[in-house]
Amino acid sequence: MIKGIIFDIDGVVLDSMSIWNDLGARYLRSLNVEPEEGLNEILFSMSMEQGADYLKEHYKLKRSTASILNGIQDMLRDFYYYEVPAKPGAKELMEFLKEKGMRITAATSSPRSHIEKALTRNKLLRYVEVIYTTGEIGISKHSPDIYNKAASYMKLAPAEVLVLEDSLYALKTAKEAGYKTAGVYDKDGETDQAGVEATGDIYIRNLSELISLWPQLN
C-alpha cells in the first residue's frame, strides 16, 4: 500500500520545462540578438558554463563568460520567482493526497530557492513536508540517493512510496530502486514518451488523472 509520495518538480508540479528549452534564446533576445534555429538542441547537452562560452564565441558577445552566465542565471531565477505556473491539476492532486493521509516530499534537480519561491507563489509549498535537491545531496538522479533520502525521512520502504517523474532516466532510477512509479507527460519535456509510458507503473497526461487511477495503486 502506498503511504508516501515523492514529487519531481520541474515538468511534474511546475510547468517550467519551457524555460530550459528557451533559456539561451531568451538571453540573446534580451540583448536584441536573434538566436539561430535549433539553438536549444545545440545547448541541450552543455552545462550552463559551456553554454555561456558558446553564446559568447558564436554570437561574438562583447561581455565576459561570467557576465553571460550571471545574466542567464538571473533570468532563470526571475522565471521561477515571478512567472512559472503550476501544472494543471497540481493543487487538486496534492489536496487529494493530503486527505488520503499521504506523506508528501519532493526531489528536484533545481536550486532550492527557485523551487521554494515558485511553490510558495503557487500556494503549493504547504503540502510538501520536505524538499531534497540533487545539488545539496551532491549526486544526480542517475543514483537513487535522493529518493532514498526522502523515503528515509518519511520512514517508509521504497515499495510504500510512489515517485512521480517526467524524465525517463529518473523514472528508471526510481523503478530499479524498488519504488512505485508514475510517468508524467510534459509537452516540453522527455522526447521518449513511449519509454516513459512503458517504464512507469502508471502513465498520466494530467496530474488529476492520478486521482481516478488511485484505487489501482493500492
Image (spheres, rainbow, N blue to C red):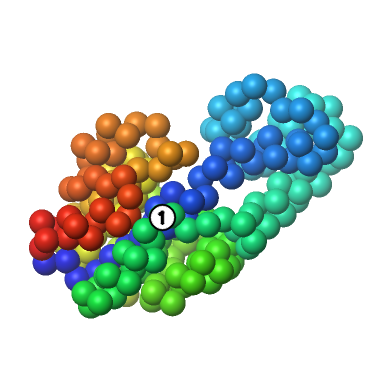
Badge 1: residue crowd in 10 Å (few <14, some 14–19, many ≥20): some
- Residue 139 shows in this picture: no
**In the image: residue 217, left or right of residue 199:** left
Q: Is residue 116 above or below residue 166?
A: below
Where residue 158 appears, x then y in whole percent? 20, 62
- Residue 91 shows in this picture: yes
Instruction: From the image, tell me which residue sits under label 1.
Output: 88
Where residue 185 appears, x then y in whole percent? 35, 43
The amino acid at mark 1 is: Pro
Where residue 148 appears, x then y in whole percent? 30, 63
Where residue 79 appears, x then y in whole percent? 64, 54
Q: Residue at x 56, y 27 (%)?
A: 41
Q: Residue at x 44, y 77 (%)?
A: 126
Quadrant in which residue 167 is drawn: top left
| Quadrant of the drawing holding the N terminus | bottom left
Q: Secondary structure at mark 1?
A: loop
Residue pushed farthest right?
62
Residue pushed farthest top?
37
Is 1 or 85 nearer to us in this picture?
A: 85
| Quadrant of the drawing holding the C terminus | bottom left
Q: Residue at x 64, y 22 (%)?
A: 37
Is 10 or 98 nearer to us in this picture?
A: 98
